Amino acid sequence: MNIKEIYEKFDAIGSLTFATINEGYPETRIAHFFAYDDKGLYFRVMFPKPFYKQMKKEKKVSVCGLNGSTAITHGEDGLPEFEPGYSMRVTGDIKEIPLEEIVNKTINKELFDVGIKDAEKYSALRIFVLYRGKGEVFDYDFETKFRDHKLLRTSFSFNGFSHKVFGLKIKDNCIRCGNCFRKCSFKAIDKINKDYVIDSRKCDVCGDCIVVCPVDAIGEK
């Protein structure tokens, strides 16, 4: 995914949860990205707020949001059910951008004009850019209403942020019993020739495959 695609996914969500660290503890609040360019994702805050001070100190932020219903219903079996949607997160490095630099933006100027108008209205407003980061889109359809598998994960990184995708793998000591293949309700395990492999894009890391493996052949990548 490029920065434009990342921004558009976040913009479709709208209000997002931004997390920073304050004296060793995470703190969250609601904000949003208002613009993007090849430098990153832009957001704004008032400088008297603790949010601003934490970002200036740590120079890092983590952001997440949900595009979908937040309501949880229950099926006939009593288990929770969720309407299809996607959640999304990004973590990375941030820096404050002078308003003069925002004024001189020519790419996506209409988006940046929103920040300029807001700064003219509120003189304490400051603008930050998340200039490099990593994240994931977690596209879920747990009831398989629109496809034959529950999950599709898309990992991304931008502007040089180092990113290792977490997931599970089947190791060389696999005895090919097929227990994991039969147990996986996410349809994340395929049989290729005689070997079983895990598709990280479909895997929820729920651990069901690990529990049923008789030889401890499933672990982290």
Image (cartoon, rainbow, N blue to C red):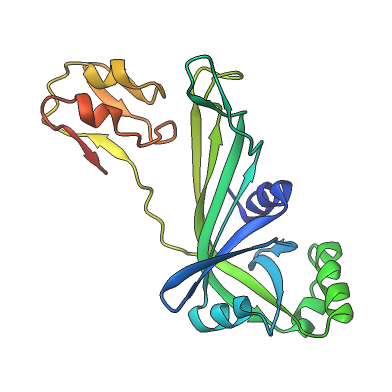
Q: Note whether 173 is above or below 192 in the view shown.
A: below
* Residue 104, horizontal then vertical, whole percent: 81, 78
* Nearer to me, 66 or 40: 66
Q: Residue at x 60, y 18 (%)?
A: 145
* Residue 18, horizontal then vertical, whole percent: 59, 63
* Whether residue 41 can be seen here: yes
Q: Quadrant of the C terminus?
A: top left
Task: Tell me where residue 110 sits by quadrant.
Answer: bottom right
* Nearer to me, 180 or 30: 30
* Nearer to me, 69 or 156: 69
174 lies left or right of 117: left
Q: Note whether 19 is above or below 70 in the view shown.
A: below
210 lies left or right of 214: right
* Whether residue 104 can be seen here: no
* Residue 62, horizontal then vertical, whole percent: 53, 62
Q: Residue at x 72, y 84 (%)?
A: 98
Q: Residue at x 59, y 68 (%)?
A: 130
189 lies left or right of 84: left
* Residue 113, horizontal then vertical, whole percent: 86, 69
* Nearer to me, 112 or 120: 120
Q: Residue at x 66, y 37 (%)?
A: 68
